[in-house]
Image (spheres, helix red, strand yellow):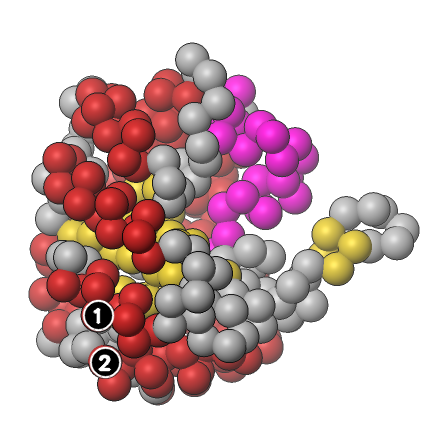
Amino acid sequence: MSLLSGSKILDRLRSGEKFIADGAIGSEIIRNGVATRDILAANITFPYRVRSLHQAYLEAGADILTTNTFGMPDGLQWPAAMQRGIQLGIDACIESPRAVGVWVSLIPRMVVNEIDTLRSLMRDIYPRPEIFLLETCTSLAESLKDLDALGALEPSVVCVTCHFTDDGRMLDGTDIHESIMALTSAGANIVGANCGDDATDFDAILSKIKRIVDLPTLIQPNAGLPIRDTVTGGLRYPLSPEQFSRLGSNLFHAGAGIVGGCCGTSPAHIAALLRNYRVGSASNIF
């Protein structure tokens, strides 16, 4: 099946269609036995684990996959790990029996400094990625610099999601209105929020965003703040798949164009959202 292009996704969002994105990448790769420091390197050392996670999200019903590329440069292996991560996501979409999209996840503060490396590694990726997701933005000034630099990659769509605290501000103190207006003016095609302090905050965050701009919105709550398991020593997240599906449904009804998950969400969370609230078959319409 062909890869769903960025322009096609954007056109369908503008016409009122809804899309399910996938859930967490990093916390799921950790859950599958990869050390935190090796998440990005897993594209090379454990590609089958990354690919199986993409496949699990596709089987759960995700319309858009996220590449395992949310990481800072940490040595000579970084470009190869980034390139492999992008290709793994694209290949998973191409081999899907239905048309799905993929976006390249980028961490703030990295894009400006590594734009030449990113542009170089993109040359060997086929088909060329069209959508870039700058996510978990905590500083408006840094985000605007990254957004400007992304123009060198000639994306058809740029999504930007911010981490807003429970007082409705980015960590640098910028409020929702200022941040969304500035990102929109700088060329973001899709805006929204991810991560956050409390999953229940996202209804109010989305409502504010919808009052500010008439753009497609992407909302990706986490599964609550992690809790240290006293038995295993690992982290667990309190929001169950059914609780997440109710939250996701509320966000769709409130006007979100795309809903996915952040830290702690899994294929089970995405499957619950599809199972409980989707209408129709593979139409991408709720």
Check residue 43 in the rendering and tell me which mark sits there, or answer none: none
In front of the other: 283 or 143 = 143
| Residue 190 place in picture, x, y as percent | 22, 63
**Vertical side of 227 occupied by 2: above or below:** above
Q: Quadrant of residue 227?
A: bottom right
Q: Quadrant of residue 39?
A: top right
| Residue 157 place in picture, x, y as percent | 16, 52
**Vertical side of 39 occupied by 81: above or below:** above
Question: Residue 31 lies in magenta, yes or no?
Answer: yes
Question: Residue 58 lies in magenta, yes or no?
Answer: no
Mark 1 is on which residue type? Met
In the image, taking residue 1 as reference, residue 275 lies left or right, namely: right
Q: Are marks 2 and 1 in contact (CB under 8 Å)?
A: yes
Mark 2 is on which residue type? Ile
Residue 62 can be seen in this image: no
Name the residue tied to disc 1.
181
Instruction: Give the residue at x 30% y 36%.
Output: 111
Q: Earlier in the sequence, mark 2 or mark 1?
A: 1
**Vertical side of 229 occupied by 30: above or below:** above
Badge 2: how crowded within 10 Å, few (<14), some, or many (20+)? some
Segment colored magenta: 22-45
| Residue 21 place in picture, x, y as percent | 37, 60
Instruction: Give the residue at x 33% y 57%.
Output: 140
Instruction: Give the residue at x 42% y 21%.
Output: 78
**Numbered marks: total:** 2
Residue 78 can be seen in this image: yes
| Residue 231 place in picture, x, y as percent | 89, 51
Instruction: Give the residue at x 43% y 84%.
Output: 204
Name the residue tied to disc 2.
212
